[in-house]
Amino acid sequence: MPIDYAALEKSIREKFAGDVVAWTTFRGQHVLHLKRENVISALKFLRDDPAAAFAMLTDVTCVDSLRLPTDMQNEYPERFAVVYNLTSLAHNAQLRVKAYVPEDPSEIDSAVSLWMSALWGEREAYDMYGVTFKGHPDLRRILTPDNFQGHPLRKDYPLKGRGERDNFPKYQDIPSK
């Protein structure tokens, strides 16, 4: 049975009235826009409500709106948006949830308590964008070295880097026996 997105939007707006920024649809993709404060409660509702049953978190990523075109900046009330892509196998449906995070402090609650699949996506968003996920059990860099300075997917990061390639430790050949 397909999801009644209009009814789902109505129930979300009633239950999380102060947290809903918007509900948009683009090319058949429904997007729930939220403030970050109660994002875990909203995600839990979307997971546990039988009318939604978004039991699978397929991806967690981040968007930096710093240099978006002017006509797109109105969509982003804060610099970052943590994006959760949810799937309902019971209803064969998808929903994207965007939670807006300011630049300072760039932190949001972790969704690991709801879905273990959030572990690596949150670590990647932390490493690449610098968004901290409060309550994450193992929040550390995943794609860059531990001593890496900065977050390379932020829009204010230099296009050619900061000379990291010149400062990486040199690897030595392993002598043959």
Image: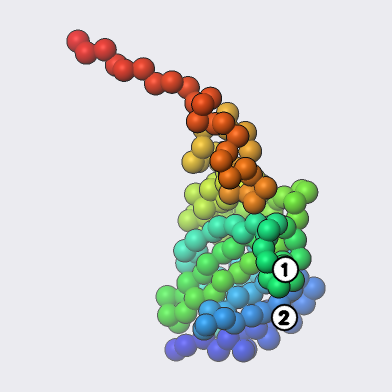
Residue 53 visible somewhere in the drawing: no
Give the residue at x 47% y 22%.
Answer: 169
- Tell me: residue 33, above or below residue 2: above
**Could you say where residue 12 lies in the image, as x and y percent from the top left?**
68, 79
**Could you say where residue 109 lies in the image, as x and y percent from the top left?**
67, 54
Which residue is denoted by mark 1 in the rendering? 70
- Tell me: residue 133, above or below residue 19: above
Instruction: Pick out the residue farthest to the top.
Output: 177
> Which residue is at the front of the view, 163 or 106?
163
Tell me the quadrant of the picture where the N terminus can be found: bottom left
Give the residue at x 52% y 82%.
Answer: 27
Which residue is denoted by mark 2 in the rendering? 13
Tell me the quadrant of the picture where the C terminus can be found: top left
Label 2: which secondary element: helix
Mark 1 and mark 2 lie on one chain; the one further toward the N terminus is 2
Tag 2: residue type?
Arg
User: Circle 1: is it few (<14), some (14-19), or many (20+) Cα within 10 Å?
Assistant: few
**Could you say where residue 146 lies in the image, as x and y percent from the top left?**
55, 31
Tag 1: residue type?
Thr
Horizontally, residue 173 falls left or right of residue 65, namely left
**Could you say where residue 162 lies in the image, as x and y percent from the top left?**
60, 34
Give the residue at x 51% y 69%.
Answer: 86
Quarter-of-image position of residue 15: bottom right
Residue 5 visible somewhere in the drawing: yes
> Which residue is at the front of the view, 119 or 113?
119
- Cβ–Cβ under 8 Å for marks 1 and 2: no
Horizontally, residue 9 falls left or right of residue 19, namely left
- Tell me: residue 118, above or below residue 57: above
